[in-house]
Image: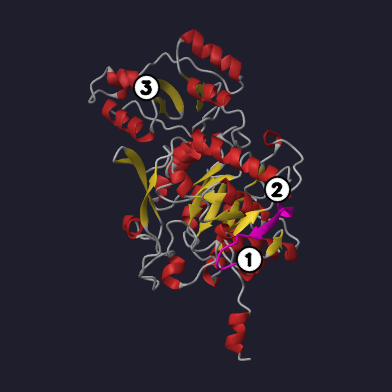
Amino acid sequence: MGSYNKKMLDAAVAFNFDDLIVLPGLAQVEPKDISIGTRFTKNIALGVPFVSSPMDTVTESAMAIALARRGGVGVIHRNCSLEEELNMVRAVKRAESFIIRNVILISRNSTVGEASTIMLENHISGLPVVEAGKLVGILTSRDVRANDPVNRVEQAMTKDVITAHEDVTETEAINLMRSNRIEKLPVVGSDGTFRGLITYKDIITRGKYQHALRDKDGRLVVAAAVSPFDLERAKALSKDADALIVDVAHFHNSAVIAATKKIIKETGREIIIGNLGTKKGVLDSVSALDSVAALRMGIGSGSICITTEVTRAGSPTLFAVSQAADALEELGSDIPIIADGGIKNSGDIALAFVFGASSVMMGQVFAGCEESPSPKTRIEDKYYKVHRGMGSAAARAKRAIVDRYADSGGKNIEEGIEILVPFRGRVDDAVDELVGGLRAAIGYAGATDIREMRNASVALVRTPAHKDGIRLKGNK
């Protein structure tokens, strides 16, 4: 037998979501009692196993805030300037802090018009007025409306400001704001130095989302995407983001691995690598790097990705996840695996867990939500939102992604498309639907949590291409 003929006969079968189903097992608990907590990275635990894709029609601050409030995590996209990405990350960190530390400030010599612009751009309704590090007043949106735009902030601001010290409790802060009929409470040191800001809205929201994903300071958790070749951006984002995703179409590349090694060394943050598609890719990458916080698996199987169509190269998500699980088993490692690409519903999510995933990254599912960045479009009494691949002409036109789909590197073809997806309401509704379906799927499999799903049995779907319905066990 010739070597090429043998290569064809020995070719791996790259199954994906539509090829397999989970076989029912002995149910042990009711769906409502099934745990869906998991890990995003080695050190970040999730309440729900959902991650939003770093795509410019999927994840900006509104999406990341909504997901973190439900126990998931959003990854801010990088198809923008560093300043824009930083502002989005910081908006998430400001969203629900008890004491907001990274506060947007203004000086007394600025104009009311300038203050109005800052408020509109950052979706805030008040600005502490600080000079030489000390609080001298506060300007609210009510003050802005009551004053001419050319007036100076000093003329419009409230000078006799009610403040609190850093040791203030939530109950004390609420009582202070209620008794003084204010919504913002600046925090100052004993010498009048401005230390932060407490808002009534944040305290109330914190109480509503008891299971939100928060950092040690009580702020919402957020991740950010970076290029492996933009060390300065990675270092800047690492000061605020809880984790960084090295965001490339094909991570198994010697230059990418070398560049990522520098990012890991110089940022001190957890670094997620991807995308990867093969066992060898995982082995080579993990072995070459000092620390990997998680693996992002799947190449070419996203709903708006046409990489496999135009190049005939790729690794379907489910197959890629199984490759990663086998590699980590060989290494004796428990690095979390993120299944990325083509996940449409809770059944797909359940299958990803059967083959070793810890969480799932979704683009199209969240692109249709109210909190995604793209506007709603009405067509014949139905609403839609735009969703596009980061290798699409529209995404590439927005900003040169030199390391991913760049003409300068020889990639002068489109690897993504732009589509309309049905509007599906708020993230809360989408999460509720996914959680309900996922718990039911885990229960059908006879498991009680995500980790136990690895023991579930699966079977090939009976199609003309798979007449015998070959049965598989676990992730083998």
On the question of residue 263 being in view, the answer is no
**Residue 181 falls within the magenta-colored stretch:** no
Query: How far is the residue under mark 1 from the one under mark 3?
Result: 53 Å
Q: Categorize mark 3 by other alpha carbons within 10 Å: few (<14), some (14-19), many (20+).
A: many
When the figure is inspected, residue 153 is found, relative to residue 233, above or below; the finding is above
N-terminal label among 1 and 3 = 3
Query: Where are the magenta residues, as a range?
Result: 453-466
Q: Where does label 2 land, which residue? A: 445
Q: Disc 1 to disc 2, how far (Cα)? A: 28 Å
Q: Residue lying furthest bottom in this view?
A: 2
In the displayed structure image, the side of residue 80 where residue 294 appears, left or right: right
Eyeballing the image, is 401 above or below 428? below
Residue that label 3 marks: 139
Q: Position of residue 465 (x, y in %)?
A: 56, 68
- Rendering quarter of residue 130: top left
The residue indicated by pointer 1 is 282
Label 1 vs 2, first from the N-terminus: 1
Residue type, numbered disc 2? Ala
Q: Earlier in the sequence, mark 3 or mark 2?
A: 3
Residue 141: image location, x then y, percent? 34, 22
Q: At 54% from the left edge and 23% from the top edge, which residue is drawn?
A: 203
**Quarter of the figure that contains the N terminus:** bottom right
Tag 3–tag 2 contact (CB < 8 Å): no
